Image: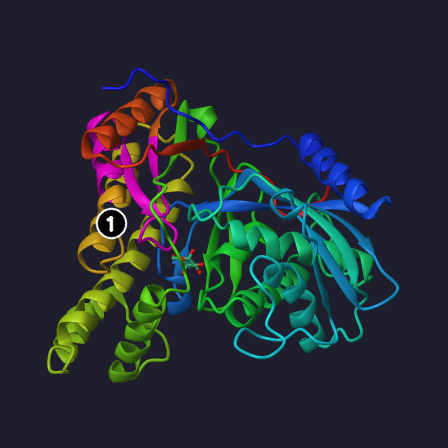
């Protein structure tokens, strides 16, 4: 057993983020940025692998953010730097960049930033200016906490302002319709420039969440509602466990799940699996049972339809105005647990590190626990009594040591503000 205290990944304060990004910008570009913009990572409370099926999701924005110090240029050049690439500034041009797999392909993380300008130009905002930008992010990389969406969304709000597009509004007075349009462009960036066939949950969370609230996101029509989620007021906390198990959204597994859902929807004669009501699930599964890949299609469909139902039930529960205690808290925990089971057994997108994290957290007293995000690695969340956060984290760390896994990292997830400009 280890006696080491579990490691919590701290969020930079807005001031620290702004200062770090500005200092890097000055050092590398020898000029003052026009401003510093930021965008948060996210965790999803429930509603996993529902977004590209037109269903419901319930994410919160994290206090962990990408900070982008940016200065508009008079030409079409884009120069990008981060602490990791300090020695080698990425240089590209808006005149030549293009999607992954084409001659204009942009390497690595630069695709997520320069790519947003590319997408906005295809959306009708022509001849955007180039820019110099320095990125400092404290969203754990590859932890399934939407580090890439945070990059896209920080670029989106920065370009929106320096190019005068007028879409985002401010975090205090956001223009939600404008932000929804930015979401579409960030998703296009992820899909085409980075080649990851994801839905829109991550970018919606980063741009459209509210502090102290979870975002009820209906991916059928893009509508949102803000669900009160002030856990601290209930003496609760949401512990995020970054398993450190490798996770990637463009390695084929995620795309294979999405393709299976599309195949099932086609066989069932609906546009998206969200069109199957929970009452009609037995007949739908019966219909799928005569197909060649019945086992796969039945499992994927059962997960998606039941997960949308669980999400609706948790949203209703959180909105009923009663304190999150007693039987209500137990029911919220059961819904989270059931979500994980469905992702493990039917969607087959968990991994030993995720399953052990969830089991250890529950055994240490969590009210509910589940993987969050795309899965196959990444992070899990546990709903715990605030005073037990460190004990639950320590129990998970010990379970990892017993299993011989790499040590996990932890975050305390407090629902934070959406993307915007730092003062
Ligand atoms: C990843 C994707 C999202 C969503 C989740 C699963 O985070 O980026 O679009 O599909 O997986 O819910």
Q: Which residues are magenta?
A: 355-383
The residue sitting at 22% across, 34% down in the picture is 404
Left or right, 226 with respect to 133, comes to: left
Helix, strand or loop at disc 1? loop
Task: Confirm whether residue 50 shows in the render.
Answer: yes
Left or right, 13 with respect to 266, comes to: right
Q: Is residue 26 on the magenta stretch? A: no
Q: Residue furthest top?
A: 3
The residue nearer to you, when weighing 421 against 22, is 22
Count of numbered circles on the image = 1
Q: Is residue 374 on the magenta stretch? A: yes
In this view, 375 is above or below 380: below
The residue sitting at 18% across, 65% down in the picture is 299
**Residue matched to label 1:** 351
Task: Confirm whether residue 175 shows in the render.
Answer: no
In this view, 103 is above or below 390: below
Q: Quadrant of ligand 1?
A: bottom left
Instruction: From the top left corner, tell me how far across and down residue 141 is, in percent.
Output: 49, 46
Quarter where residue 239 is shown? top left
The residue sitting at 58% across, 57% down in the picture is 109
In this view, 55 is above or below 42: below
Instruction: From the top left corner, tell me how far across and down residue 394 is, in percent.
Output: 31, 23
The residue nearer to you, when weighing 360 against 201, is 360
Left or right, 387 with respect to 29, comes to: left
Instruction: From the top left corner, tell me how far across and down residue 157 is, in percent.
Output: 70, 55
Instruction: From the top left corner, tell me how far across and down residue 49 is, in percent.
Output: 35, 60
Q: Residue furthest front?
A: 87
Which quadrant: the C terminus?
top right
Which quadrant: the N terminus?
top left
How is the rendered protein coloured? rainbow
């Amino acid at each position: 057993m280890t006696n080491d205290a579990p490691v919590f990944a701290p969020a930079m304060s807005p001031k620290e983020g702004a200062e770090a990004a500005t200092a890097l910008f000055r050092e590398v570009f020898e000029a003052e940025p026009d401003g510093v913009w930021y965008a948060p990572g996210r965790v999803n409370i429930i509603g996993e692998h529902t977004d590209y099926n037109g269903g419901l999701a319930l994410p919160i924005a994290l206090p962990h953010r990408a900070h982008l110090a940016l200065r508009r240029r008079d030409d079409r050049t884009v120069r990008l730097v981060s602490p990791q690439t300090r020695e080698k500034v990425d240089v590209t041009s808006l005149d030549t960049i293009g999607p992954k797999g084409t001659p204009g392909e942009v390497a690595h993380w630069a695709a997520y930033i320069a790519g947003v300008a590319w997408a906005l130009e295809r959306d009708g905002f022509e001849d955007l200016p180039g820019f110099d930008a320095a990125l400092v992010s404290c969203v754990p990389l590859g932890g399934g906490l939407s580090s890439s969406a945070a990059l896209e969304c920080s670029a989106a709000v920065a370009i929106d302002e320096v190019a005068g597009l007028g879409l985002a509004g401010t975090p205090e007075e956001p223009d939600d319709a404008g932000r929804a349009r930015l979401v579409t462009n960030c998703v296009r960036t992820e899909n085409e420039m980075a080649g990851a066939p994801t839905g829109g949950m991550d970018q919606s969370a980063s741009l459209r969440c509210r502090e102290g609230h979870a975002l009820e996101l209906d991916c059928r029509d893009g509508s949102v509602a803000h669900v009160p989620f002030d856990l601290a007021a209930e003496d609760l906390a949401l512990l995020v466990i970054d398993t450190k198990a490798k996770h990637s959204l463009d390695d084929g597994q995620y795309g294979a799940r999405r393709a299976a859902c599309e195949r099932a929807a086609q066989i069932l004669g609906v546009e998206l699996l969200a069109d199957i009501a929970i009452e009609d699930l037995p007949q739908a599964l019966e219909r799928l049972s005569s197909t060649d890949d019945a086992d796969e299609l039945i499992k994927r469909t059962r997960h998606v339809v039941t997960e949308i139902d669980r999400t609706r039930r948790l949203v209703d529960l959180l909105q009923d105005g009663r304190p999150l205690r007693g039987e209500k808290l137990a029911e919220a925990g059961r819904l989270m647990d059931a979500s994980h089971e469905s992702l493990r057994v039917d969607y087959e997108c968990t991994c030993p590190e995720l399953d052990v994290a969830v089991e250890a957290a529950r055994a240490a007293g969590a009210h509910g626990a589940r993987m969050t995000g795309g899965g196959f690695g990444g992070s899990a969340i546990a709903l715990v009594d605030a005073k037990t956060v460190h004990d639950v984290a320590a129990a998970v760390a010990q379970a990892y040591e017993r299993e011989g896994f790499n040590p996990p990292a932890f975050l305390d997830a407090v629902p934070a503000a959406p993307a915007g400009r730092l003062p």
